[in-house]
């Protein structure tokens, strides 16, 4: 359990403290949970629910690689839904962007959206882009920055998607908190 937890939440923080006032001082760190020593049993139940919810939302996805981009002869790639930052349709290919790699797969954007639907964190923002809302850095009127403000992470919001994107992101944030 400890190893599985560490692999799954290697960047998550859980605070355990006898000083309840620290909760407010550390909110900017985006901790998964705060466990107060004085309320250990109750707070641990909340933590367990949050952990279970995180596990439920992450999915293992299998994609068939495009043979032209397949240099090491692998036919399929397995990715966790949380590893996908965004997907882009480009020249009849779907390019899946993660932190470390870009994968060209045999799939349409519509099929991709069907496959990731149960993760509840993906939304199509343009006829060519679908994003993982967990990685939104900034939204303005016509663009979304994913991860940070670098121009390579700036994606255009399609005119017909603007209202849906704003509403979906608002709902996503409300569900998280």
Image: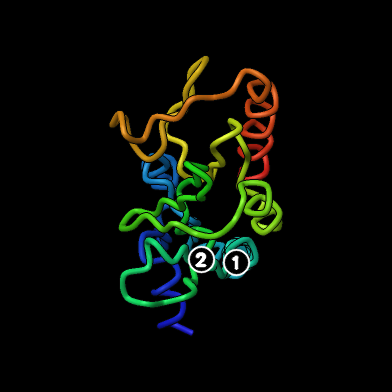
**In the rendered view, would you say 47 is above or below 25?**
below
Tell me which residue sits at (58%, 62%) in the image. Answer: 54
Tell me the quarter of the image containing the C terminus: top right
| Residue at the limit of the structure toward the top, as seen here | 141
Q: Name the residue under label 2.
A: 80
Where is residue 125 shown, x and y percent of the image? 59, 32
Within 10 Å of disc 2 (Cα), the crowding (few <14, some 14-19, many 20+) is few
Residue located 59% across and 56% down the image: 107
- Colouring convention used in this rendered image of the protein: rainbow
Disc 2 + disc 1, Cβ < 8 Å: yes
In the depicted view, which residue is nearer to us: 159 or 69?
69
Is 112 on the left-hand or right-hand side of 88?
right
Front residue of 125 and 140: 125
Of residues 121 and 31, which is closer to you in this image? 121
Q: Position of residue 30 (x, y in %)?
A: 43, 46
* Secondary element type, mark 2: strand
Tell me the residue at 62%/33% (across/down).
169
- 115 to 172, vertically: above or below: below
Circle 1 SS class? loop
Mark found first going from the N terminus, 2 or 1: 1
x, y percent for residue 112:
62, 53
User: What residue do we see at 59% from left, 23% from top?
Assistant: 158
Q: How many labels does the image show?
A: 2
Q: Where is residue 132 in the image (x, y as percent from the top left)?
A: 53, 46
| Label disc, if present, on residue 59 of the rendered structure | 1
Name the disc covering residue 99, or none. none
Front residue of this view, candidates 61 and 132: 61
Q: Where, by quadrant of the figure, is residue 73 drawn?
A: bottom left
């Amino acid at each position: 359990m400890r190893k599985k937890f560490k692999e799954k939440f290697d960047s998550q923080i859980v605070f355990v403290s006898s000083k309840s006032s620290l909760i407010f001082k550390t909110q900017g760190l985006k901790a998964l949970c705060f466990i107060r020593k004085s309320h250990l049993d109750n707070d641990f139940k909340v933590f367990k629910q949050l952990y279970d919810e995180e596990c439920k939302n992450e999915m293992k996805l299998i994609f068939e690689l495009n043979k032209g981009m397949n240099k090491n002869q692998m036919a399929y790639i397995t990715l966790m839904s949380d590893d996908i930052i965004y997907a882009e349709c480009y020249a009849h290919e779907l390019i899946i962007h993660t932190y470390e790699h870009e994968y060209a797969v045999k799939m349409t954007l519509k099929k991709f959206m069907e496959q990731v639907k149960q993760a509840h964190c993906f939304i199509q923002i343009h006829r060519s882009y679908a994003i993982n809302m967990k990685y939104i850095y900034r939204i303005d009127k016509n663009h979304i920055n994913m991860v940070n403000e670098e121009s390579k992470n700036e994606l255009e919001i399609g005119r017909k998607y603007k209202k849906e994107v704003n509403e979906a992101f608002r709902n996503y944030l409300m569900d998280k908190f």
